[in-house]
Amino acid sequence: MERVYNFSAGPSVLPVSVLEKVQKDLVSFGNAGMSVMEMSHRSKEFEEIIQKCEALLREILEIPTNYKVLFLQGGASTQFSMVPLNLLKHFQTAAFINTGSWSKKAISEAKKYGDVKIIASSEDKNYSYIPKLEDLYIDPSIDYLHITSNNTIEGTKFSSFPTTKAPLVADFSSNILSEPIDVSKFGLIYAGAQKNIGPAGLTIVIIRDDLIGHANTLCPTMLDYKTHVGASSLYNTPPTFSIYVSMLVLEWIKEQGGLKQIHENNLLKAKLLYDFIDQSPLFSSPVEIESRSLMNIPFSTSSEEINKQFLVEALANGFVNLEGHRSVGGMRASIYNAMPVEGIEKLVQFMSQFEKNIV
Ligand code: PMP
């Protein structure tokens, strides 16, 4: 069976060379005589895997030494409660910039533990843009400011970040490792692995030292960052296989030339698709130009019928998972790091042919 072009928003495409390495070592990892799936998380072999995974992430993202890296479970959704449970310490107040469905979920969870101030929102225009940061007033009496750096469903991303006195917390689930970032600007970064890092099941948290150890007294042990820092992410059984595959993906990122090169590829891929959409008489993008995501690209025709026809024909031609999120409809191409340029070139060719048949 030939591989398709998989535009899934997550879990999503992984580099073929990584899958081949996994296949090669699936039954016996190195000289272990067993699969990574069968190993104790306290074995010497796994200890090396988790340490290498952390070292690679630190190197690739240039994570400063006063930050801890955690390998957790529960998805980014668990971080929606873990962050307020640990960070609401002085003012019992968190500020949010509301840029879409995932921000809203993070907001409603934080409201259970403290006060929430929405200091900016793009809800007025269907979340089709990122609010202007120059217009922001950030109250000094907040414990943290939360943003969603890339909005997977709406297809927007922050191109710069707010400057705050309070820690900046960012949900990087759908654009971590897509470009270099200055980690020192953030108090805490979290991301589910299943887009740019590896398979589902792993959640990565990068947390500044001073934010550890202040959890709410009712915070469950498993949701206290201190628990996992103290045990080097081995307090309980971590998602061992996801960590192993993520380590291979991080090696692949290094082989590609690191985040600078990855970013250049991502800019090129996104430009190919946006340029085509912007000149098309059939397809259009709902997102304001300056706010456009490099990872998730929603587009649509003016007719539901034609959208449906497009999706059926795309599928028949090996372009898979192009449906827009069920809450917004239309189409969406998620083009994470592992989507090759060729995948976008072929998609654009296909869209162009489809357009000729319709218009
Ligand atoms: N935040 C963002 C930006 C996401 O894209 C997603 C998942 N698509 C989530 C949070 C939720 O992640 P999880 O399914 O890992 O809980």
Image (cartoon, rainbow, N blue to C red):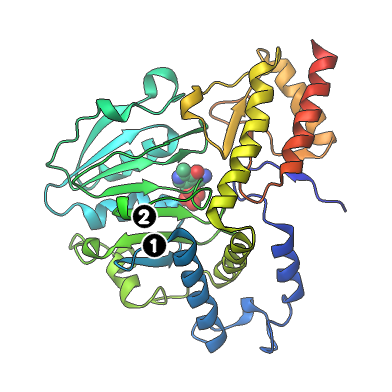
The quarter holding residue 114 reads top left
27 w.r.t. 330: above or below: below
The residue where tag 1 is placed is 63
Residue type (three-letter) at the residue carrying disc 2: Val
On the question of residue 178 being in view, the answer is: yes
300 relative to 221 in the view: left or right: right
Dot 1 falls on a residue whose secondary structure is loop
- Between residue 137 and residue 75, name the one nearer to us: 137
Q: Is mark 2 within 8 Å of ligand 1?
A: no
Position of residue 193 measured from the top left corner of the image (x, y, whole percent): 53, 56
Sequence-earlier tag: 1 or 2: 1
**Crowding at mark 2 (Cα within 10 Å: few <14, some 14-19, many 20+):** some
Residue placed at 66% from the left, 51% from the top? 338
33 w.r.t. 349: above or below: below
Position of residue 31 measured from the top left corner of the image (x, y, whole percent): 69, 89
Marks 1 and 2, how far apart at CA: 6 Å
Residue placed at 35% from the left, 71% from the top? 228
Mark identifier at residue 316: none
156 w.r.t. 210: above or below: above
The residue where tag 2 is placed is 183
Marks 1 and 2: CB-CB under 8 Å? yes
Q: Is mark 1 within 8 Å of ligand 1?
A: no
Residue type (three-letter) at the residue carrying disc 1: Ile
**Crowding at mark 1 (Cα within 10 Å: few <14, some 14-19, many 20+):** many
